[in-house]
Image: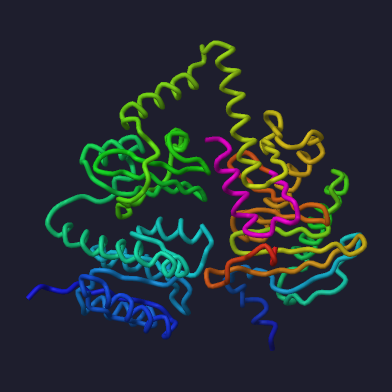
Amino acid sequence: MEKRNKILILDDDTDWLALCRDWFAELPSKPEILTANSAKRALALLETESVRLLISDLKMPRIDGLQMLAIVRRQFPDVRTIVLSGLEDEEYRSRAYALGVDLFWLKMEMQQNARLFNECVESLLGQTDREHDTGFRGIQSKSLMDIIQMECLSRSSSVLRITRGPLVAKLWIQEGELIDAEAEGARGETAFQRLLAWKTGTFENLPAEPDHPRAIHKPVNALLLESAHTMDEAADPNVAPEIAASNEHRKTMWKLSQLTREGAEFVIVVPTAGQGQPEALGTQNFSALAKWTSRAADIARRLGDRLEAGPLSHVAGQNLERQVLMLPRGDRAFLVGWPTDVTENVPEKSRKLVASWDS
Amino acid sequence: MGFIKKLFGGRAAAVQQLPTGTITVDRDGHIVTSTVSSVFPKKLLHDIGRDVLELFREARVAQMPLAEVSLHFGSLHITARELRGGAIIFLFPQTALMPTPTLSRL
């Protein structure tokens, strides 16, 4: 008789546990479902049962999900883990992935993309089987070019989901051929070129989408070569002035298009260390605002240190005409201005804008 | 009798708590009312009031008068509304178990 995989679901909401029990029991591989409404109970089950996959919530009393995942990572390294949370903050996703979680899904997304979610779970259960025989995990240190080449050389079909802070990109690979890309609001070849400029990030393999329409027709090697050539040109200090000016113009146009696409009014970039000039797009008279940005960054940082309140995420301000967000990033501070009618996810949108600024 | 304890008791190890509650400050930065625990150092509360007023003041100088300012730290959110030169300041400590902040609560 074929051995059934065991899935352990951890959540303090018993109604949700019941729903999940029915949901996962319907998976094609018919796994055995275990449930726990506390981390303590879940740990006891992990001790006694050979669980293949743990699906955990984050927001729980006493031991929260992140603490639980840290324990599981240390004590049960063979158990694959999925976080299923209602917390939309990107910080939790980053913290969960930093703890070695295999997948992070929002409960809302799980219900909206049920088929994709189920395929991810099945794929993870299958992966666990394969890993018992052979294979490697953790190739995050490879460059994106390496990963794409590996995927294409293996003639595999998959969707690569690449995350860099708040930015998310996707690459569709069909039988070793790159058929489409999506990054920073662009699609096709443009998106692919944007994506290759990313220096860091994490990636995950999603199930293939065979019906996805093809938008890239060039071979992947030609695209990689073109991209490498463009990057070399941009990095060359001896490049002709007209080419440098053209590159600079293209960069400015890209930033403006980003600004317009997101719906922001302006962006001001201020070096906080006092070196260099402020940079602005979307506003003419920016010196006073740049001064406020620099001042706000100083004040907030100083106050945060004195209160021991943790790292500064952002400073927001608003009046009847507009809202502004100041975000520190490395040795610079960004001030993003938004009209007051933009009400949804302004911090997240600002973070995306800032993250794509230098790429 | 208690004086021996005072001499030899020493101070218990403690972690500084984050402030929770509301304070109002006048235009000079003096605290007018406070619902923050009296255990929390007055000096730090005063610093919060002063820094928030400075943010409002600097924004006026930059021709961008603000009605509301909020500072979002990893474990504390400070939201301040301008009150005729002074300010009312709300202090919300954040934990992993707190709900995600949204714009309406900025």
> Can I make out residue B89 in this image?
yes
Count every numbered label the image shows and give the total.
Answer: 0
Q: Residue placed farthest to the bottom in the image?
A: B1
Occupied quadrant, residue B9: bottom right
Instruction: Point out residue A316 in the picture as x, y percentages from the top left corner.
Output: 71, 55
Q: Is residue A292 found left or right of A41 in the rendered image?
A: right
**Looking at the image, which is closer to me, A83 or B58?**
A83
Residue A344 forms part of the magenta stretch: yes
Q: Is residue A23 found left or right of A316 in the rendered image?
A: left
Say above or below: A91 vs A50.
above
Quadrant containing the N terminus of chain A in the rendered view: bottom left
The magenta region covers A335-359
**Looking at the image, which is closer to me, A164 or A256?**
A256
> Can I make out residue A298 in this image?
no
Occupied quadrant, residue A120: bottom left
**Looking at the image, which is closer to me, A282 or B21?**
A282
Instruction: Point out residue A104 in the picture as x, y percentages from the top left corner.
Output: 40, 62
Occupied quadrant, residue B38: bottom right
Residue at (69, 86) in percent of width and height:
B2
**Looking at the image, which is closer to me, A187 or B94?**
A187
Residue B84 forms part of the magenta stretch: no
Say above or below: A139 vs A281.
below
Residue at (32, 65) in percent of width and height:
A81
Instruction: Point out residue A203 in the picture as x, y percentages from the top left corner.
Output: 37, 48
Instruction: Point out residue A208 in the picture as x, y percentages from the top left corner.
Output: 30, 52
